[in-house]
Image (cartoon, grey):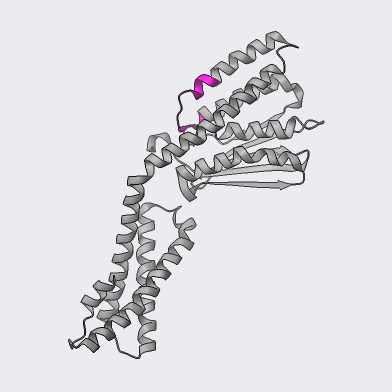
Amino acid sequence: MLIALLVLNLPASTSLYDFASTLFLRSAVVAPAGLLILAASCALRPLIVRESYKIQWLILILLSGCITTLCEVVVVFVSQQARSPWQLFTSAIVGISASCALAQILRWRAQSRGPALVQARIAALSAHIRPHFFFNALNAVLGVIRSNPKQAEVMIEDLSELFRSLVTGKTLVSLRQEVQLAQKYLAIEQMRLGERLQIQWEQTEDLDDCVVPQLLLQPLVENAVRHGVEPSVDAYPIRVLIQKQSRQLVIKVENHLPGVSAAQGHRMALDNIRERLMLLFDLEASVQVNQTDGFYKVEVRLPLQRWSSV
């Protein structure tokens, strides 16, 4: 960027003093402009990342041009050296070009190195949560195998269907498949807990083909059962809400929280989900936890994507 500005703004005289003076002034523009562009890009990233690819480039171009021009004007004011409109224009163009080039280089670098590492980490996280799910599901069967063998047999058959859907090792599944997995798990727990387990399920229509990570919803309802229903003396319903908000898929799970210690049990699954969402969707996805009035609420937001667009 500095070299480009020097070439476009060489002084009329070729003396060493003029060249050094120009180098100093150009450096006074380039260094602050570069730092300000990076700082502004990082600060605005949570907002920019939700926009389309073209809008992101447009924002970067406008941001780079305005900041570079502003730095140029400040340097002109401080140095008291007149600058022609052409020189201001070339400074803005160079700033825009340098920012776009750096952004594209970083994008290529992330695309070339990212997929293998991301997939390896996602596989490791999924492998970590699957045995946890299997262990808890089997414990649910063991809880009734002596008191009600026939019911335990039905539960084992349901478990086999659940395991069969998970052995594929898929990273992404449709929302319909994830909902079915969670509901099958809740059906197994219903046999064990009986009327103590009450579910209030609300889902917006036309969301079945949305793309979600496998084992996203099931760990949330499992936590609600383990840390909300089981320790409670009274029956409190688990509320599940799945809806569309703008260009986001929103999943909310709410359960009664008997004590503060129960909240600690949610962390492993939530940390696992949060990291997988970050690897898959970056800042476009989020996990928010809120504990108020004796209820534990988890809200997951991720980009609304259809299988047809994947």
Q: Is residue 51 left or right of residue 294?
A: left
* On screen, residue 90 above or below 174: below
Residue 165 on the magenta segment: yes
Q: Residue farthest to the bottom?
A: 80
Quadrant including the N terminus: bottom left
* Residue 61 is inside the magenta segment: no
Question: At 45% from the left edge and 42% from the top edge, which residue is drawn?
Answer: 280
Percent x, y for residue 191?
A: 70, 18
> Residue 131: x percent and y percent?
57, 27
Picture quadrant of residue 81: bottom left
- Residue at coordinates 38% horizontally, 39% vertically from top-left? 116
Q: Position of residue 106 (x, y in %)?
A: 34, 55
- Relative to 296, residue 83 above or below: below
Residue nearer the viewer, 94 or 130: 130
Query: How far across and down, in percent of the image, does residue 110 sit?
Result: 36, 49
Question: What's the magenta region?
Answer: 163-176
> Is any atom of residue 162 visible in this view?
yes
The quarter holding residue 118 reads top left
Q: Count the marks: how many?
A: 0
What's the residue at 40%, 74% (across, down)?
Answer: 32
Q: In the rendered view, does 97 fall on the left or right side of 198?
A: left
Q: Residue at x 63, y 20 (%)?
A: 138
Residue in front for this viewpoint, 252 or 39? 39
Query: Is residue 56 placed above or below 272 in the rendered structure?
Result: below
